Amino acid sequence: MNSVARSLSNLFRQSVFATEPFNAQLQQTRGIRVQVYNGNLEGALALMQRKMTSSGIERMIKIEQRFHIKNSEKRVLAQKNLQRRLRSQDLARKLKAIMIKKVRGL
């Protein structure tokens, strides 16, 4: 059943989005999905809000609206990016050391 649905959706995508650019096709597939269990709409809305906040969609929407970003927000974003980059470099350094030890047989 999944293969049939997949082939139909691919067929639909090709026919509808053939005239649109590639970026528009990507925008159609992005999004956040939240399931409502036992009619608990409030819980689903809270979960959607958390997902939107963590994935950065709110920031992306703000950027698309072209509002001015406050300097304090710029500093916070720059600090988060710096911490993310330093953590990534540190983990890469540790992984490299582990791989060297494995290769050398220590």
Image: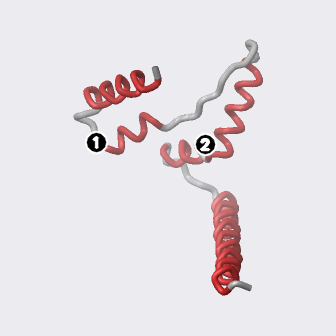
**Residue that appears at 32% across and 24% down:** 12
Which residue is under mark 2? Answer: 58
In the drawing, does residue 20 fall left or right of residue 27? left
Label 2 CA crowd tier, 10 Å (few <14, some 14–19, many 20+): some
In the drawing, does residue 89 fall left or right of residue 8? right
- In the foreground, 1 or 54: 1
Rendered image quadrant of residue 105: bottom right
**Residue that appears at 58% across and 43% down:** 57
Query: Regarding mark 1 in the picture, which secondary structure is present there?
Result: loop
Judge whether 60 appears above or below 81 on screen: above
- First in sequence: mark 2 vs mark 1: 1
Rendered image quadrant of residue 44: top right
**Extreme-front residue of the structure:** 105
Label 2 – label 1 distance at C-alpha: 24 Å
**Residue that appears at 75% across and 13% down:** 38
The quadrant of the picture occupied by the C terminus is bottom right
Residue 61 image point, x, y percent: 54, 42
Which residue is under mark 1? Answer: 21
**Residue that appears at 69% across and 72% down:** 91
Residue 19 image point, x, y percent: 22, 34
Q: Which amino acid does label 1 sit on?
A: Pro
Query: Regarding mark 2 in the picture, which secondary structure is present there?
Result: helix
**Extreme-top residue of the structure:** 39
Judge whether 38 appears above or below 3 on screen: above
Q: Residue 98 carries which label?
A: none
Q: What residue type is labelled 2?
A: Glu
Rendered image quadrant of residue 94: bottom right
Kindly report which numbered mark, 2 or 1, lies closer to the viewer in this rendering.
1
